[in-house]
Every structure is written in structure tokens, then in C-alpha cells.
Image: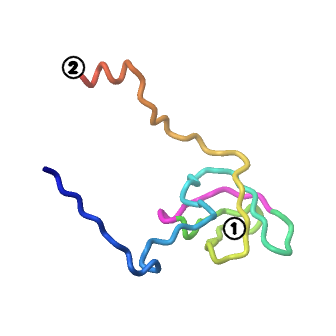
Amino acid sequence: MKQSTVFTMSDPDALPVRYYKAWEYFLPGDEVDVKLRGADSQTGQVVDVMPDGTGVWVYVHGVGRRLFSVEDAVEITVTDPARRPDITVNSADEAREKK
């Protein structure tokens, strides 16, 4: 008979933080609109993204490369996404794998 183990988390602060900005889904090459609080929006291009989504490097046109952190009062919106890799599996791929 299988037994299951139940873990009880007594300290909710020990859970990993999930950031609401979802910057970890940005890819280098994404064209973005950057809006800082109290400033006009500027366009730019994502250069690099921290894997945990805590920061993103953006080359802001006319300004240069800049690191934005989740703590910054900034809104970054993708306006023209970079090409995403196709990770779907079709039946032809499955048939090849079975051989």
C-alpha cells in the first residue's frame, strides 16, 4: 500500500515570492513601451531578463541601457514581441520518437 506524506508549512513567509509584473516571460528582442511614474512613455527593446522576474534590462531609445527592478514604479508593456520558439508537439514528431 502506498503512503503519502503531508508537509505543513508553518511559516508562509518561507514560500517563494511571486511577482505580479511577470517580467520572467519577456524575451530579449521584445519591443516594449516603458512608462515611469510622472514621465512620458518611451520605447525600447528588452536586452536581458532575470530568470526569477525581479529585473529586466531594457535599451531605452534615446537614453541607453537601463536596469528596471520590480520595486521600481515602472510599467513595461510588450508592443512587438520577439519570435517565440515553437514548443508544440505534433503527431509526426511523436511518431518519430516512437521509432
Residue 99 image label: 2
Identity of the residue drawn at 37% across and 75% down: 9
Looking at the image, do the residues carrying marks 1 and 2 touch, with CB atoms under 8 Å apart? no
The answer for how far apart the CA atoms under marks 1 and 2 are is 51 Å
Question: What element does badge 1 sit on?
Answer: strand
Q: Is residue 18 magenta?
A: no
- Residue 41 position by quadrant: bottom right
Rendered location of residue 72, percent (x, y): 68, 76
Rendered location of residue 80, percent (x, y): 70, 45
Magenta residues, start to end: 42-52
Mostly what secondary structure, the magenta segment? strand
Identity of the residue drawn at 35% across and 23% down: 93
From the viewer's perspective, is 9 left or right of 22? left
Identity of the residue drawn at 61% across and 73% down: 69
Task: Kindly report which numbered mark, 1 or 2, lies closer to the viewer in this rendering.
Answer: 2
From the viewer's perspective, is 65 left or right of 99? right
Residue designated by label 1: 64
Taking depth in this image into account, of 18 and 47 the one nearest to the observer is 18
- The quarter of the picture where the C terminus appears is top left
Taking depth in this image into account, of 90 and 84 the one nearest to the observer is 90
Residue type marked 1: Gly
Residue 7 image label: none
Question: What element does badge 2 sit on?
Answer: loop
Residue type marked 2: Lys
Q: Is residue 51 magenta?
A: yes
Taking depth in this image into account, of 99 and 15 the one nearest to the observer is 15
Q: Relative to 94, say whether 32 is above or below.
A: below
Which residue sits furthest front? 1
Which residue sits furthest left? 1
Identity of the residue drawn at 59% across and 65% down: 56
Q: Relative to 86, say whether 66 is above or below.
A: below
